Image (spheres, helix red, strand yellow):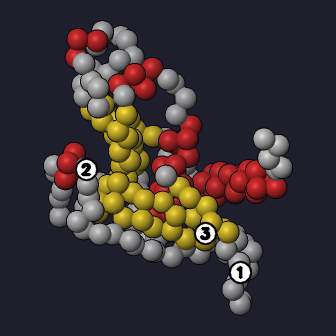
Amino acid sequence: MTFFTRMSLGPGERDDDHSIKHHPEQDPSDVGNPALEAEVRLGTVIKVRVGGKIHQVYIHGQADLYDPRIKMLDDYKITKAESMYYENKDEYIFQLNALAYIWRQNGKPVEAIRNVYLFRNYDPRRYKEGGKYPKEHVAMTDIPMWDDERSIKSIEDRRIKHKIAELTEDRD
C-alpha cells in the first residue's frame, strides 16, 4: 500500500525536489506470513517500509519481499480465489510502481515487480482449463513496470486527487 502525507518545505528545499530518504521500520519478529518465511535467501529483505518526498508530499510504502539478486519487488495478496475473475487491477499496478520508484530512489535497483496471490479458499475441483479460476493455491502475476517519469506523474496525479477530495464537502 502506498500512503500520502503532506509535508512542508524546509529551508533551502524547492517544490521540485524529488529527494527520497530511507525510513526502515522493520521489526524482524514481525514477518507474520508463513508463506513469506518459507524461502528467505541471504540479502532478501522482508517487510521493510521505505519513503521519501516528491514535491511537498511524503510518500511511503511497505515491500513484502525484495530480492536483490534478481532486483524484484513482490507484493503478497491474501485473497479469495474468486478475486481472479475481476480484470481491473489498476490499483495494484499503481501501488507496486510507486513502491518501485521509492526503492530506486533509495539506491535499491528494481527491474521487476509482481503480485503473489495466496488464495485462502482455494478449491482445486473448481479449476477448469481456460477459465479464470486459478490452477494452484498460489498465483504470481508480473506487473508492467513504469519509468521514473511516469511514476512521478502518477504519484502527482494521485496527490491532486487526494487534495481535491480533502476540499470536497461531505454532504452526508
* Residue 107 circle label: none
Pick whichever, 170 or 35, lies toward us: 170
Residue 11's place in the image compared with 161, above or below, is: below
Left or right, 138 with respect to 24, comes to: left
Give the mark nearer the N terminus: 3 vs 1. 1
Q: Which residue is drawn at 35% across and 54% down?
A: 64
In the shown orientation, is residue 143 left or right of residue 30?
A: right
Dividing the picture into quarters, in which one does residue 122 lie? Answer: top left
Q: Where is residue 125 in the image (x, y as percent from the top left)?
A: 23, 11
Label ID, residue 33 = 2
Question: Residue 59: x, y in percent?
Answer: 57, 64
The reply to whether residue 18 is in sight is yes
Disc 2 element: loop
Q: Which of 37 and 147 lies nearest the eye of the viewer?
A: 37
Give the SS element for disc 3: strand
x and y, in percent, of residue 129 in the image = 30, 9
**What is the distance, in whole Å, between disc 3 and disc 1 at their CAs?**
11 Å
Marks 2 and 3 close (CB-CB < 8 Å): no
Confirm whether residue 71 shows in the render: no
Seen at 30% across and 31% down, the residue is: 119
Q: Of callouts 2 and 3, which one flags the residue occurring earlier in the amino acid sequence?
A: 2
Residue under pointer 3: 58
- The residue carrying mark 1 is 9
In space, the residues marked 2 and 3 are separated at their CA atoms by 28 Å
Disc nearer the start of the sequence (1/2): 1
Q: Which amino acid does the dot numbered 2 rest on?
A: Asn
Q: Callout 3, which amino acid? A: Tyr
Q: How far apart are marks 1 and 2 (CA)?
A: 38 Å
At horizontal 28% and vertical 13% (from top left) the residue drawn is: 127
Residue at position x 55%, y 41% from top?
91
Say if mark 3 contacts mark 1, CB within 8 Å: no
The local crowd at label 3, few if under 14, some if 14 to 19, many if 20 or more residues have their Cα within 10 Å, is some
